[in-house]
């Protein structure tokens, strides 16, 4: 990838990290790629090298022993505005990504990072510098609330943080997709709160919550007498959001007539109110969101393809909570802090309780988790919310819904865990008899083979295919387990 560096003037990388292992690994990788590396473990040496005109690009950790890199960045951009600075951090929050962008970093990479990605970013940063482009404008932060549940250290969330950080510097239209409860409006607010429009209004409208016949009036406003009941002029959402951001939630539920008018606004930058005659100019950034598959709606003829491409300039998919269970601990901590601010007592969750939450499928995503945490904090008497409290809450929800939760229908591991807990408890202080593994496997194997045979009407060849085992193996197990004679006893 970097062989051209050897034939041209060698580029120099300034590397600052107080972790000697990271310095060693990065130095070796960058050197093999054809770069010269000047490494240091502190901010003052990094600053001296930059101030003396050394280096073609900088890679720095945020937390250095003598000074935070975010404090050095504005000084670097002041004296060398075209010098790309790559920021690394183990504190992988949205605030880190946002701050890195605001202070003028070329790119932010969370630790642990991929070496190939780092080398690619270095190469692109040097290409940008050679064209004389500035990395980013130096801005001061606004007041974004770190306690909002847009948190998590998973790779999926890190990608989202970086996209948000980049998009705050532009007016590009963003299409946010994701299941209900994943935090689409939070992302839209973050894009607004850190943009140049942050002092102007942020206006949200949910298409699914507005009667179809009123959507055009809600979006574009109406004049007095425009229709029956229009007793006065109404300023629509575009007018309310003038200079700021308009968030169109559940865009897939917008009627075709309104889609046509919205497309014209995006193309021409103007609209006409319902019953009005004079077009109005608009200066609004549009962010759209949906939990539906818009491409499928296009095939069905209920969503305009040209509008889709106008809205989907920057696609941003929010992962469901079940795809990032490792973030649940951070989310719970965030919700617990919010509970304290709202006057509820300080609580913690036990390790086993968090592990149980991580195994849940969360059909309601982050919103469902937030509601559960608030409820448990409010009703649980102890300072620590344990596994039993979480299980009791899930059981209560099952009783109210009249059916088991989705994860309890499909999660065999969870069912076995519960069964074994009761099994061991039944022996009290005594140890269960030896041979537990074989007994458990047999108890699972018997209903599994029986169900496969029933599904294939007793055809052993097809049942073996369904199970994914050899036909002779199935016949042997049927004989060994005496399936025609066996009675499904509990473990003894």
Image: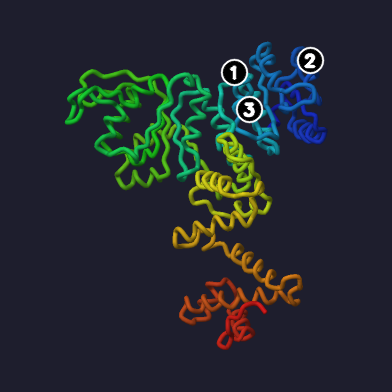
* Image coords of residue 286 (percent x, y): 41, 28
Say which of 309 and 489 sits in front: 489
Query: Of the numbered discs in the image, which one, if any, rests on residue 175?
Result: none
Marks 1 and 3, how far apart at CA: 17 Å
Say which of 126 and 288 sits in front: 288
> Which structural element holds mark 3?
strand
Say which of 75 and 25 sits in front: 75
Q: Which residue is drawn at 66% across and 71% down?
A: 423
Say which of 250 and 54 sits in front: 250
* Image coords of residue 110 (percent x, y): 66, 35
Q: In this view, does 141 lie above or below 440?
A: above
Give whichever of discs 1 and 3 has the lower sequence position.
Answer: 3
Mark 2 Cα within 10 Å, few/some/many (few <14, many 20+)? few
* Image coords of residue 491 (percent x, y): 65, 77
Marks 1 and 3 close (CB-CB < 8 Å) = no
List the residue tagged with mark 1: 140
List the residue tagged with mark 3: 107
Marks 3 and 2, how far apart at CA: 22 Å
> Which structural element holds mark 2?
helix
Give whichever of discs 3 and 2 has the lower sequence position.
Answer: 2
List the residue tagged with mark 2: 48
């Amino acid at each position: 990838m970097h062989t051209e560096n050897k034939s041209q003037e060698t580029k120099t990388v300034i590397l600052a990290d107080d972790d000697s292992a990271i310095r060693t690994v990065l130095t070796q990788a960058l050197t093999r790629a054809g770069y010269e590396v000047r490494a240091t473990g502190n901010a003052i040496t990094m600053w001296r090298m930059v101030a003396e005109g050394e280096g073609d690009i900088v890679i720095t950790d945020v937390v250095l022993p003598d000074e935070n890199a975010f404090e050095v960045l504005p000084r670097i951009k002041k004296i060398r505005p075209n010098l790309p600075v790559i920021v690394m951090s183990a504190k992988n929050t949205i605030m880190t990504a946002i701050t890195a962008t605001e202070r003028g970093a070329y790119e932010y990479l969370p630790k642990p990072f991929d070496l190939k990605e780092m080398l690619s970013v270095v190469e692109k940063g040097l290409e940008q510098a050679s064209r004389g482009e500035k990395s980013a404008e130096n801005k001061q932060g606004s007041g974004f609330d770190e306690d909002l549940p847009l948190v998590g250290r998973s790779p999926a969330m890190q990608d989202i943080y970086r996209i948000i950080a980049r998009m705050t510097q532009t007016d590009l239209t963003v299409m946010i997709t994701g299941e209900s409860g994943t935090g689409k409006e939070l992302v839209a607010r973050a894009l607004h709160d850190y943009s140049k429009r942050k002092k102007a209004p942020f206006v949200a409208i949910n298409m699914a919550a507005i009667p179809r016949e009123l959507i055009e009036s809600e979006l574009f406003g109406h004049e007095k007498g425009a229709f029956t009941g229009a007793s006065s002029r109404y300023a629509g959402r575009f007018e309310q959001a003038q200079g700021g951001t308009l968030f169109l939630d559940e865009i897939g539920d917008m009627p075709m007539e309104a889609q046509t008018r919205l497309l014209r606004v995006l193309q021409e930058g103007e609209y006409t109110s319902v019953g009005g005659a004079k077009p109005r100019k608009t200066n609004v950034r549009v962010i759209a969101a949906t939990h539906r598959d818009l491409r499928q709606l296009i095939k069905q003829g209920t969503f305009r393809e040209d509008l889709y491409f106008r809205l989907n300039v920057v696609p941003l998919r929010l992962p469901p909570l079940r795809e990032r269970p490792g973030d649940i601990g951070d989310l719970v901590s965030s919700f617990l802090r919010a509970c304290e601010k709202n006057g509820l007592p300080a609580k913690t969750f036990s390790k086993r309780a968090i592990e149980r939450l991580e195994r849940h499928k969360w059909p309601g995503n982050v919103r469902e988790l937030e509601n559960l945490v608030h409820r448990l904090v409010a009703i649980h008497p102890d300072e620590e919310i344990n596994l039993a409290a979480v299980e009791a809450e899930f059981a209560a929800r099952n009783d109210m819904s009249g059916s088991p939760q989705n994860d309890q229908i499909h999660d065999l591991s969870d069912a076995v865990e519960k069964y074994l807990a009761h099994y061991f408890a039944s022996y009290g202080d005594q140890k269960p008899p030896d041979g537990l593994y074989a007994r458990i496997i047999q108890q699972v194997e018997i209903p599994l083979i029986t169900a496969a045979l029933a599904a294939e009407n007793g055809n052993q060849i097809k049942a073996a295919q369904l199970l994914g085992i050899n036909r002779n193996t199935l016949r042997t197990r049927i004989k060994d387990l005496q399936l025609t004679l066996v009675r499904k006893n509990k473990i003894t």
